[in-house]
Image (spheres, rainbow, N blue to C red):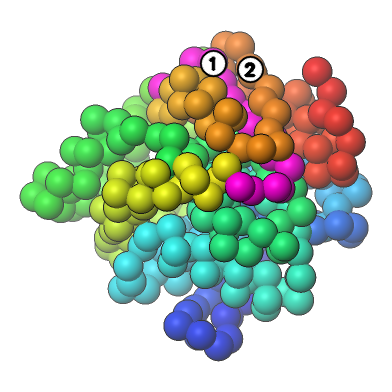
Amino acid sequence: MAELRLSGGALDGLALHYVSAGRGPAVVLLHGLGGFAESWRRTVEALAPRHTVIALDLPGFGQSAKPSAHYNLGFFAAAVGGFLDGLGLGSASLVAHSMGGAVAVAFTLTRPARVERLALVGALVPGFYHLSLPYRLGALPLLGDALALGRSARLYKAALARCFYAPDRDEIDFLVDHCYDDRTSWPARVAFLRTLRDSRDDLVLRASDYRRAIGSLDTPVLLLHGRQDPVVPASYCRQATTGFRRAEVRWLDDCGHFPQLEHTAAVNEWLGAFVAGRPAPR
């Protein structure tokens, strides 16, 4: 794990942790809500032989700084841009999961020349996502605050298991237990709650703006999605696919919200071909 401090702009001094491996064209991996860089460990290993693969802890998550900030998509996109600047990367391919997909889309729309290819894995695409009941409940002023006070690994694991088609206990233990104290500290729980609340305007009030902007995007896009995803239903992915000009989709059967963990070999094969600029194998 390495650390980079952003310099310049509104996020000057913000510390971001990341893991990296390999040499070659840059691929940056963005986790979802509550996630962290090492959750991509299997993808890092698969892509590293031909690429420089960098998995980032977004601000507020993992071991990155957890500032008092407005955690909307613009904030995260600015952090991704500062991160690329700090590493001296003019451009990279982005691979993003779940809420990280919304961040990747927001960054690509504002800086399209810096994104070579965009892969969205079980991703939430702004403009094509309707808030789920758990999302709406978690964002409520009083209920969300009450939930943020809780800190139970057993409850976290039970909730996470519902996101998988066939839960893997070892995988769920890793996703919850890794750097548990850092990831469940009070600042981390506040950042989680603020992300739910602050990104809501992007997902609801600005949905039509995102749809229009996405329709003009010329970046190649690959969507990988589980047919049984309970977090971002498959119907949302179908709608999002029609919104991009240059998009293709690969569906996974018997797969929930974590295709990169539930169908690792297939997903890594598709991602490897896509970021290399080859047609993704079927």
Gap in angstroms between the C-alphas marked 1 and 2 = 6 Å
Q: Is residue 51 found inside the magenta-colored segment of the image? A: no
Tell me which amino acid carries mark 1: Arg
Look at the image and give the residue range highlighted in magenta. 216-230
Give whichever of 82, 239 is nearer the camera: 239
- 223 shown above or below 147: above
Question: In the drawing, does residue 251 fall left or right of residue 90?
Answer: left
Q: Quadrant of the C terminus?
A: top right
Tell me which amino acid carries mark 2: Leu
Give whichever of 139, 16 is nearer the camera: 139
Image point 22% across, 43% down: which residue? Answer: 138
Describe the element under mark 1 as helix, strand or loop: loop
- 146 shown above or below 186: above
Residue identified by numbered label 1:
227
Majority secondary structure of magenta residues: loop
Q: Is residue 218 found inside the magenta-colored segment of the image? A: yes
Image point 34% across, 33% down: which residue? Answer: 130
> Looking at the image, is mark 1 or mark 2 earlier in the sequence?
1
Extreme left residue here?
A: 142
Residue identified by numbered label 2:
252
